[in-house]
């Protein structure tokens, strides 16, 4: 292993590990000790600090030779298409999502599959995972693979753990929601997502890919 990657790998482990620990086994005792607001503050502080460490460690690693040509047409088109789907899922994930902390969560679940939930019941998490995939496709260097891998593990393992957590919190409402939806994305569900996620997702995709140039110094999407 390249020794220059060691700090980045350590930061990625801490970033993912603290999220899981505070979201699951440590949540109850910490809330009991400092209260719900105190927990939210601590969670946010740890998340921000660990993410900042990971970003700084990422920037400290010199770019290496990519495993394949991420600038080739196939990789570029593939990454752009994956990011568009991720944008659609992210925009749609805010509408009637039973997984979000919302007092109407049971009502949302009772609606059955709707919008982007025809694709997956974890659209926000899969948007993060697809973001990871797109960046590895376009920039397959060791440092990108470590950072993107950390985000993907956090998203997908977090989604699986969330199923168990929500079943405890929501009981039969979540169980019925699980039976009516899918953990793994169903591509055909994008045709049933509705106009709003697609319009919002396309706008987000265009804006984010345009901003990628001035912010990251690398053109993305149609702005190549």
Image (cartoon, rainbow, N blue to C red):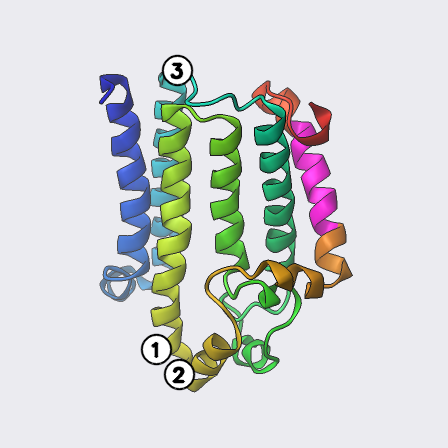
Q: Which portion, as a residue range, is magenta?
A: 200-211
The spot of residue 104 in percent (x, y) is: 56, 77
Per the image, the residue denoted by label 3 is 64
Q: How far apart are the alpha carbons under marks 3 and 1?
A: 45 Å
The residue lying toward the viewer, choosing from 72 and 37, is: 72
Instruction: Please report whichever mark, 2 or 3, sits nearer to the chain's N-terminal start.
Output: 3
Residue 207 counted in the magenta span: yes
The spot of residue 81 in percent (x, y) is: 64, 41
Q: Residues within 10 Å of mark 3 (few under 14, many from 20)?
A: few
Per the image, the residue denoted by label 2 is 171
Task: Look at discs 2 and 3 and give the one toward the viewer.
Answer: 3
When the figure is inspected, residue 137 is found, relative to residue 109, above or below; the finding is above
Per the image, the residue denoted by label 1 is 168
Q: Main secondary structure of the magenta part?
A: helix
Q: How far apart are the alpha carbons under marks 2 and 3?
A: 49 Å
Q: Are marks 2 and 1 in contact (CB under 8 Å)?
A: yes
């Amino acid at each position: 292993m390249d020794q220059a990657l060691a700090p980045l790998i350590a930061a990625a482990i801490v970033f993912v590990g603290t999220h899981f620990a505070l979201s699951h086994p440590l949540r109850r005792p910490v809330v009991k000790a400092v209260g719900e607001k105190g927990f939210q503050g601590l969670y946010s502080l740890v998340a921000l600090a660990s993410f900042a460490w990971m970003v700084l460690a990422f920037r400290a690693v010199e770019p290496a030779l990519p495993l394949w040509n991420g600038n080739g047409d196939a990789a570029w088109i593939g990454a752009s298409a994956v990011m568009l789907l991720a944008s659609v899922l992210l925009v749609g994930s805010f509408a009637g999502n039973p997984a979000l902390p919302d007092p109407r969560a049971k009502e949302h679940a009772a609606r059955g599959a709707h919008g982007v939930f025809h694709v997956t019941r974890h659209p926000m998490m899969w948007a993060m995972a697809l973001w990871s995939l797109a960046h590895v496709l376009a920039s397959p260097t060791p440092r990108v693979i470590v950072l993107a891998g950390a985000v993907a593990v956090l998203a997908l393992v977090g989604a699986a753990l969330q199923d168990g957590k929500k079943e405890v919190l929501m009981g039969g409402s979540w169980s019925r929601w699980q039976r009516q939806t899918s953990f793994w994305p169903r591509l055909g569900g994008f045709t049933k997502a509705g106009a709003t996620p697609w319009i919002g997702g396309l706008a987000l995709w265009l804006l984010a890919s345009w901003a990628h140039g001035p912010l990251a110094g690398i053109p993305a999407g149609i702005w190549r």
